[in-house]
Image: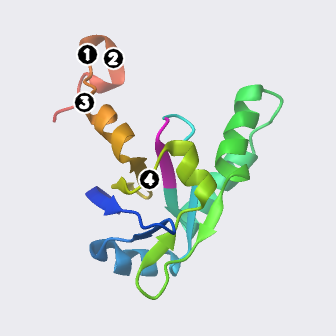
Amino acid sequence: MFQGETAITVDDKGRLAVPTVYRDLVARACGNRLVLTYNPFEAGALWLYPQAAWERVRDEVMAMPNVRKTVRTLQQKLVGSAAFLEPDGNGRITIPPSHRAAVGIEKKAVLLGMGEKFELWSEQAHRAQIQQTLSDEDLGEELLGLRL
């Protein structure tokens, strides 16, 4: 399980180092095979899955009937734009230029461990996201009993 927030530096070639704390976990979870795709719900972020977790998501998304535009868009953003990545000998992965440009990742980014996947945010989008707060109107019935 991935959790936590790490500030990441992206070099001129679009490479970033997988944080040391996650390297062994990534190697065990997926044999160092990762899949990068767009976050279809929030601008400024990419999703990074271990391959096995990705395959479950991919199969579920592609099993949906694509007669609705929303489903087709979800399939395009997740599956059609997926890129396979493997860390190099120094634990670095290369983020494709198209993905970096689409979400505004330049020199600095933020990697969030989110359970079975990572979220890779541009520094600016991450800052804007964490500055948002939830109001009472945002909370549905399913969250009212949550003890934090």
Going 80% across and 35% down the picture, which residue do you hit? 66
Label 2 environment density (alpha carbons within 10 Å; few <14, some 14–19, many ≥20): few
Q: Position of residue 81 (x, y in %)?
A: 68, 52
Q: Nearer the viewer, mark 1 or mark 3?
A: 3
The earlier-in-sequence mark between 4 and 1 is 4
Residue 68 figure quarter: top right
Circles 1, 2 touching at the beta carbon (< 8 Å): yes
Return the residue at label 3. 131
**Part of the protein shown in magenta:** 43-47
Check disc 1 and give the amino acid type.
Ser
Q: Nearer the viewer, mark 4 or mark 3?
A: 4
Circles 4, 3 touching at the beta carbon (< 8 Å): no
Check disc 2 and give the amino acid type.
Asp
Q: Secondary structure at mark 1?
A: loop
User: As drawn, is 112 to the left or to the right of 61?
Assistant: left
Label 1 environment density (alpha carbons within 10 Å; few <14, some 14–19, many ≥20): few
Return the residue at label 2. 138
Residue 89 covered by magenta stretch: no
Q: Nearer the viewer, residue 54 or 63?
A: 54
Q: Position of residue 129 (x, y in %)?
A: 33, 34
Return the residue at label 4. 106
- The quarter in which the N terminus is drawn is bottom left
Q: Secondary structure at mark 4?
A: loop
**Mark number for residue 135?**
1
Count of numbered marks: 4
Q: Position of residue 113 (x, y in %)?
A: 34, 57
